[in-house]
C-alpha cells in the first residue's frame, strides 16, 4: 500500500507517521499493492481532525474523526475503517483479496460474527431532466428544491456533475474521473 500523509496547519512528527504505518499496516493484507492510503491531519483551534481515505480496485473507504489529540483521532478512524470492512465483508470479498479478508477478520476476532448483509432495494426511481448549468446555477437549483445534492450537466465541461451540501454548510462538487 502506498501512503500519502498530509498535515494542514500542523507539522507531523515522525512518530505519528510511524503510528500511521503501523495502524494502517494491518489493512495491507486485504488490499492490493496498488492501494493508496491518504491521511490528512488538520489542526483547528484545540481539535485535531484525522481523515483517512483508502482507494483500491474501484473501492473507496473513508473515515474522519476529531479529537483533542491526533493519536486518539487516528485510533478512532482505524476502528471505523475496520467496522466498515467487517460490515461489508460479503460484498468486499468479491473485489478484494478474499483469503486475506477472511484472515484479517480471524485475527481481529470477528470471523465468527456473521455481519448482516444489507440488501439494497431500490424503492423509487426518478427521472431527471439534465440540462446544462454552471456550478453556481446548480447550487441555486439545489437550494430551491431543498435537496442535499443536485445532478446537472456542467456547461463548462459538458460532463455530468453533482453538487452537494457538506455538513459544515459549504458546498462540494463531484466530477467524473476515468
Image (cartoon, rainbow, N blue to C red):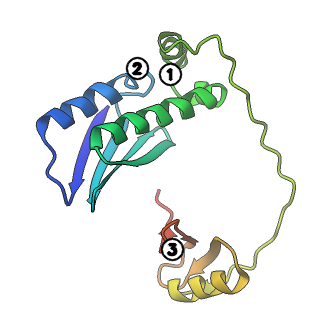
Q: Disc 1 designates what residue?
A: 97
Image quadrant in which you'd find residue 140: bottom right
Q: Is residue 88 visible?
A: no
In contact (CB < 8 Å): disc 2 and disc 1: yes
Residue 108 at what x, y percent from top left? 49, 15
Residue 115 at what x, y percent from top left? 68, 24
Disc 2 crowd rating (10 Å Cα; few below 14, some 14-19, many 20+) is some
Determine the CA span between mark 2 and mark 3. Answer: 38 Å
Work out whether 143 lies above or below 147: below
Q: Nearer the viewer, mark 2 or mark 3?
A: 3
86 and 120: which is toward the camera: 86
Determine the CA span between mark 2 and mark 1. Answer: 8 Å
Q: Disc 2 designates what residue?
A: 29
Dot 1 or dot 3: first in sequence order is 1
Q: Nearer the viewer, mark 2 or mark 1?
A: 2
Residue 44 at what x, y percent from top left? 29, 61
Picture residue at 45% right of the left edge, 23% below the top:
30
Q: Which label sits on residue 169?
A: 3
Residue 36 at what x, y percent from top left? 35, 40
54 and 17: which is toward the camera: 17
Q: Quick check: 71 left or right of 18? A: right
Picture residue at 64% right of the left edge, 73% below the top:
151
Picture residue at 52% right of the left edge, 67% below the top:
166
Q: Nearer the viewer, mark 1 or mark 3?
A: 3
Q: Secondary structure under badge 3?
A: loop
Disc 1 crowd rating (10 Å Cα; few below 14, some 14-19, many 20+) is some
Amino acid at each position: 500500500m502506498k501512503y500519502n500523509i498530509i498535515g494542514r496547519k500542523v507539522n507531523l512528527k515522525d512518530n505519528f507517521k510511524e503510528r500511521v504505518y503501523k495502524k494502517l499496516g494491518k489493512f495491507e493484507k486485504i488490499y492490493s499493492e496498488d492501494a493508496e492510503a491518504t491521511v490528512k491531519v488538520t489542526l483547528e483551534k484545540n481539535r485535531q481532525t484525522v481523515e483517512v481515505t483508502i482507494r483500491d480496485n474501484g473501492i473507496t473507504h473513508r473515515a474522519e474523526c476529531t479529537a483533542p489529540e491526533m493519536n486518539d483521532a487516528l485510533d478512532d478512524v482505524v476502528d471505523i475503517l475496520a467496522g466498515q470492512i467487517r460490515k461489508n465483508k460479503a460484498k468486499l470479498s468479491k473485489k478484494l483479496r478474499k483469503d486475506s479478508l477472511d484472515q484479517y477478520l480471524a485475527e481481529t476476532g470477528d470471523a465468527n460474527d456473521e455481519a448482516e448483509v444489507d440488501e439494497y432495494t431500490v424503492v423509487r426511481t426518478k427521472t431527471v431532466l439534465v440540462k446544462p448549468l454552471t456550478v453556481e446555477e446548480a447550487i441555486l437549483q439545489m437550494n430551491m428544491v431543498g435537496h442535499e445534492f443536485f445532478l446537472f450537466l456542467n456547461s463548462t465541461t459538458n460532463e455530468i456533475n453533482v453538487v452537494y451540501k457538506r455538513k459544515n454548510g459549504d458546498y462540494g462538487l463531484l466530477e467524473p474521473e476515468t
